[in-house]
Image: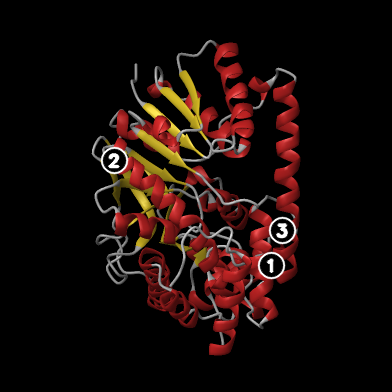
Amino acid sequence: MSNQKIALIGAGSLQFGLSSVGNILESEGLLGSTICLHDINENALSLTFQACNDTIQHRKLDFNLEMSTDRREALNDATFIINSIEIPPRFELMDIDFRVPLYYGCKQILGENGGPGGLFHSLRVIPPILDICEDINKICPNAFLINFSNPMTRICLAIHRKFPSLKFAGLCHEYIHFTPIIRKILQTPLSKLEITAGGFNHFGVILDIKYKDTGMNAYPDIHKKGPVVLRSIKNGPALDNGFDLIAFILETYGYLPYTPDSHYGEYLGWAWEKANIHAIRQFMVDYEKYLRDQYLRAKKYIERGKGWKIVKKDEESAVPIIDGIVNDRNLREPSVNIPNDGIIPNITQDAIIECPVIINKDGVHGIKLGEFPHGLAAFLRTQYSIQDLVVEAILQKSKDLALQALLADPVVETIWQAKKILEEMLNLQQDYIQIALE
């Protein structure tokens, strides 16, 4: 029997709220816990609450469910917090993040986590997340925070820098979503493969991969078969927005990234030459439609009193981490974002890295990976420098540092371009950026 209180921040998002609660409800190690749903949108929050409450009642489960639009109330006595906030309107703002820099000749391929778009996404979402952390520090300082929001690495670096004593980890589903492609390349069940991966979020690679039954290195087979398979993928899973760039990285650097073109290419000035730009842009259109359709479908179920049918678990790792800490599981998770602290020695130790971890009652502990491949480590060091400038621009509310972050970014080509993008984006997004840069 558990006496945990798990607060879900941003639970008005049906995609996040229903699946997160679905995962908690499947965890026997968390029976008896209180789940508190929080969102500033009361109507959206009520839908999530109704569906989750219906599920608990229908299945006669031993969980307590609460909801509150008051964040301080939601955090009171919380032992774990899962955050997944975004600044709406999400897709309209991401479109501005892409199109305004493009107008000035900046060839970023997505603009969600890197490039000028990544800067403005950071300016919108990091300040309110730091406000959440401020409340955690005051109300439940011993709680453990799990972040799902993007830009993951920049958010986690800002948290680590402003609240160094706060216990946290960042989670992303990229690695899990990519593993079926590894299976397709090697024609081998994942259960028969031993895989180690790491780097930065959306910018990591498979570092080591072996066949469990023989102990043989599987990379020679990936080198042989991977590029053809990657370039042949045209339609498929939700993350499928091109793998031409990923094939090029595999061929040129010898390591397989575990994410599609759209994410890995955000950090490379020359990605436009190799990435499947059409697939990336089409993915954004399709993904927005997919989420809208899923929301409307879920809303109908809830309004018909059948919300219990759509509260289901998914592959996200937040609940295994919570259960692993609460019940001292010594569980291994393959891909978690935490401060470096010696895990990759040839990358800045202050950096937030994505790596395998062991989870027990003492928290989340990174598994040491050794030195990162030198050619790829150069990319990570460049990106850390940009992340550092972005975070400091936010913490210091400095327009000069924001400009320096743009000038350091490999997708920005000229001073004129950087200044034009900065001025126009600050003007267009002034209602969505909660701090004033001086």
Please determine whether, in this image, residue 419 is positioned above or below residue 129.
below
Quarter of the image where the N terminus is located: top left
For residue 283, the mark is 3
Q: Identity of the amino acid at label 1?
A: Arg
In x, y percent, where is residue 364? Answer: 30, 44
Alpha carbon distance from label 1 to label 2:
51 Å
Residue 208 visible to an observer of this rendering: no
Q: Identity of the amino acid at label 3?
A: Phe
Image quarter of residue 80: top left
Alpha carbon distance from label 2 to label 3:
41 Å
In x, y percent, where is residue 45? Answer: 59, 31
Alpha carbon distance from label 3 to label 1:
16 Å
Q: Secondary structure at mark 2?
A: helix
**In-image side of 365 versus 169 (left or right):** left
Q: Secondary structure at mark 1?
A: helix
For residue 415, the mark is none
Q: Which residue is mark 2?
A: 138
Q: Which residue is mark 1?
A: 231
Q: Name the front one of labels 2 and 3.
A: 2
Residue drawn 29% across the image and 72% down it: 346
Instruction: Tell how many labels.
Output: 3
Residue 269 visible to an observer of this rendering: yes
Residue nearer the viewer, 309 or 144: 144
Residue drawn 45% across the image and 56% down it: 126
